[in-house]
Image: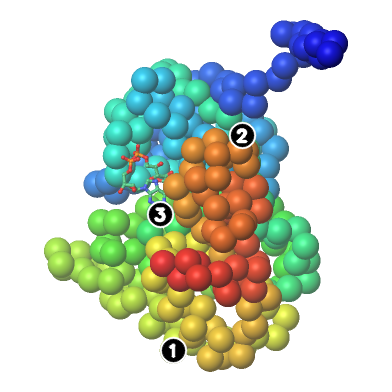
Amino acid sequence: MPRTKKPVIEKETIENPYLSEQAKITFFRRETPDSFTIRTDYKVKHTPGQFVQIWVPGIGESPISICSWSEEFTEFHIREVGNVTKHLSQLKKGDTILIRGPYGRGYPVEKFNGKSLILIGGGCGVAPLKAVISYLEKHKEKFNDIILYFGFRSPEDICFKEDMKRWATKFELHLTVDQNPKKTKINYQVGFITDALAKSKLSPENKIVFLCGPPVMMNIAIDHLKNKGFTEDQMYISAERLMNCAIGVCGHCMINGKYTCLDGPVFRYDEVSQLPDTKK
Ligand SMILES: Cc1cc2nc3c(=O)[nH]c(=O)nc-3n(C[C@H](O)[C@H](O)[C@H](O)COP(=O)(O)OP(=O)(O)OC[C@H]3O[C@@H](n4cnc5c(N)ncnc54)[C@H](O)[C@@H]3O)c2cc1C
Ligand code: FES
């Protein structure tokens, strides 16, 4: 039997999909005791809701959503929870990080010209929605009402405080904190954001809802919206799953046959509502 000849692979033609690019930190701001914003000179075209992989050599790689961008920069809002994010929290202006992406499907905001948009976010989940708001601030005239429901654990946990003030002048902003243990002087409600949503007079006509936050918050919000007559195909959720490759190879991020890194992280709710582990 003749031996099959091995194909010759030209090294130069192999593209490495894991290759990261160096990006310089041009700005660092602490937002809350456990979260911070970094601006980098990484420049990418993306859809709001997409994410990148930030790599800290020797420590690990984390998926992080793009929360703001311009022709000149890309910003990320990051909560310190473990090794990678704690390392990133110690960086300063001038340091470099390694980034690849963007990946996944974001919020299809451009599809909904002429509609009213409701954005519902909890804690760090407000970060990817901030990217949607950046788009809406530039294209406000294309949409009907823009209504924001944002909830945080306490006044000290509110991120993007300066942006919130601006958003309140441009959009209908509902801001709540679960509790106010330090009795901080505030001009917004104490209570769950989902309760504010339940009490609202929102009706489903001509509206689309984008949600991002802890799964328990999103599930309660979705139940309240359904009680008001919203259907699952009017809602888009961002699903967080443990990720590894971010390019559909390792299978770490699968929700019953769907790749969160490719098919998501943003899903139209009816695409995933029946999957057993969506409600985590
Ligand atoms: C698509 C996507 C977008 C994300 N965007 C952001 C963002 O904009 N800002 C931000 O702060 N975080 C974001 N995250 C979460 C972030 O990726 C993790 O917090 C980070 O990878 C943790 O890495 P670490 O090494 O610091 O902590 P680790 O030591 O790896 O983890 C600390 C703890 O967090 C848990 N954890 C880690 N990753 C996840 C995850 N993906 N989902 C649920 N629990 C997790 C671990 O199980 C562990 O309990 C995003 C996740 C995904 C999937
Ligand atoms: S993270 Fe590897 S398949 Fe999605």
Q: Nearer the viewer, mark 2 or mark 1?
A: 2
Q: Residue furthest right?
A: 2
Q: Is residue 35 above or below residue 169?
A: above
Which badge, 2 or 1, is on the more N-terminal residue? 2
Secondary structure at badge 3 equals helix
**Image quadrant of residue 87?**
top left
State if disc 2 and disc 3 touch (CB < 8 Å).
Answer: no
Mark 1 closeness class: few <14, some 14–19, many ≥20 residues within 10 Å: few
Is there CB contact under 8 Å for labels 2 and 1? Answer: no
Examine the image and state in which quarter residue 17 appears.
Answer: top right
Q: Earlier in the sequence, mark 3 or mark 2?
A: 2
CA gap, disc 3 and disc 2:
20 Å
Q: Residue at x 67, y 42 (%)?
A: 46
Query: Circle 2 sits on which residue?
Result: 101
Residue 240 pos. (x, y %): 48, 54
Q: Amino acid at mark 3?
A: Cys
Is the CB of mark 3 within 8 Å of ligand 1?
A: yes
Kindly report the distance in space between the C-alpha atoms of the residues bearing marks 3 and 1: 24 Å
| Disc 2 to disc 1, C-alpha distance | 40 Å
Q: Nearer the viewer, mark 3 or mark 2?
A: 2
Disc 1: which residue: 199
**Which residue position holds label 3?**
124
Q: Position of residue 104 (x, y in %)?
A: 64, 46
Residue 122 in view in this figure: no
Q: Amino acid at mark 1?
A: Lys
Image: 131 above or below 209? above
Residue at 28 percent of width and 76 percent of height: 190
Q: Is residue 218 above or below residue 91?
A: below
Exactly how many numbered labels are in the figure? 3
Q: In the displayed image of the protein, which residue is found farthest to the left? A: 182
State left or right for residue 71 relative to residue 157.
right
